[in-house]
Image (cartoon, rainbow, N blue to C red):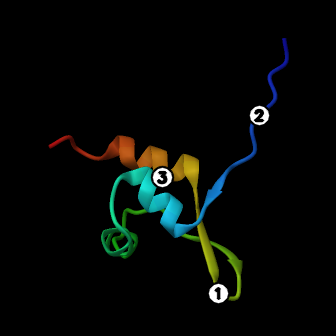
Amino acid sequence: MIQKSQPDRILRPVAAARMLGVGKTKFYDLAKSKNFPRAVILGARARGYLERELDAWLTAQPRA
């Protein structure tokens, strides 16, 4: 059986923050760190984040 690969979902910052369980301010602080996934440029003033990269980053974080 052939499986279709799902296209990469791009999440805007608010949706990405919701996925990570943080607020906007904390999300933007995280986005400034070196090991956080880089934003995808969608337009002159629009950025997004690949859902699979955010998921991988979240999985790699140590548990508290």
- Residue pictured at 35% horizontal, 53% vertical: 21
* 10 Å crowding of disc 2: few (<14), some (14-19), many (20+): few
List x then y, in percent, for residue 29. 32, 74
List x then y, in percent, for residue 54. 48, 52
The residue type indicated by label 1 comes to Arg
User: Where is mark 2, residue-wise?
Assistant: 5
- Residue positioned most to the bottom: 44
List x then y, in percent, for residue 56. 46, 44
- Residue positioned most to the top: 1
Circle on res. 54: 3
From this view, report whether residue 41 is shown above or below residue 6. below
Residue toward you, 21 or 61: 21
In terms of secondary structure, where does tag 2 sit? Answer: loop
- Whole-angstrom CA distance, mark 1 to mark 3, is 21 Å
- Is 36 situated left or right of 12 in this image? left
The residue type indicated by label 3 comes to Leu
From this view, report whether residue 16 is shown above or below residue 46. above
User: Where is mark 1, residue-wise?
Assistant: 45
Q: Which quadrant would residue 40 be assigned to in this image?
A: bottom right
Name the quarter where the C terminus is drawn. top left
List x then y, in percent, for residue 28. 38, 75
- Whole-angstrom CA distance, mark 1 to mark 2, is 29 Å
